[in-house]
Image (cartoon, helix red, strand yellow):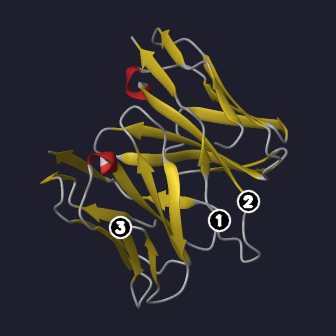
Amino acid sequence: DAGITQSPRHKVTETGTPVTLRCHQTENHRYMYWYRQDPGHGLRLIHYSYGVKDTDKGEVSDGYSVSRSKTEDFLLTLESATSSQTSVYFCAISESMASGAPYEQYFGPGTRLTVT
Amino acid sequence: GQQVMQIPQYQHVQEGEDFTTYCNSSTTLSNIQWYKQRPGGHPVFLIQLVKSGEVKKQKRLTFQFGEAKKNSSLHITATQTTDVGTYFCAGAGTASKLTFGTGTRLQVTL
């Protein structure tokens, strides 16, 4: 498996509290992604990064922010957690082709977040 | 935006039977990738198809990319219990991100 870790692996938090999830890679890959996985929805992209301090929104970015101050770390923040953000969150990394299309993505083990 | 649909959502087969999952995109894709996720695990990359009409095989798994580069399929011959999991297709447009299908969960019983 690629060198990707996520922390914490499990978290229970209350509605309205801020939460930060961390993704750390040792592969020096340029691209990093945050997805959420919910039953019936597959994997949906929240935000992604194409370099240090370079990020862009995915399809379900409302209520989430990200930061990437170092190549190896990509943080996902829920400013004020809501019950609808209860989910499993996966981080992924990849490189891209010259055309810009992505190569395969390597996923971290996931973080199970419950908002009560 | 780009949408990727995958059918069926769920399939239950007996060991030894064949299995096929289909993936359709609303837009033309630059490439399509397939992933497998075991229960409780994370998605793991299986294969990438880039060319129109491309067919690739990995042991009992056969992957196809449609001529129009808008659809794909994964066929498993003679399923085994080790094939259990959810299979996702993921389409790439021109940006460095993937749109995942909703997945097909495969259950295999003896």
Does any portion of residue B49 appear in the rendered image?
yes
Identify residue for label 3: B60
Label 1 sits on a secondary structure element that is loop
The residues bearing labels 2 and 1 have C-alpha atoms spaced at a distance of 6 Å
Chain containing mark 1:
A
Chain containing mark 2:
A
Residue A68 image label: none
Q: Residue at x 83, y 47 (%)?
A: A28
Q: Quadrant of the C terminus of chain B?
A: top left
Name the residue type under label 2: Glu
Determine whether label 1 and label 3 are within 8 Å by CB.
Answer: no
Q: Mark 3, residues whose alpha carbon is within 10 Å: few (<14), some, or many (≥20)?
A: few
Identify residue for label 1: A102
Task: Determine which quarter of the picture holds residue A19.
Answer: top right
Q: Number of callouts in the render?
A: 3
**A89 relative position to A7: left or right:** left
Q: Do the residues marked 1 and 3 share a common chain?
A: no
Q: Nearer the viewer, residue A88 or B57?
A: B57
**B3 relative position to A75: left or right:** left
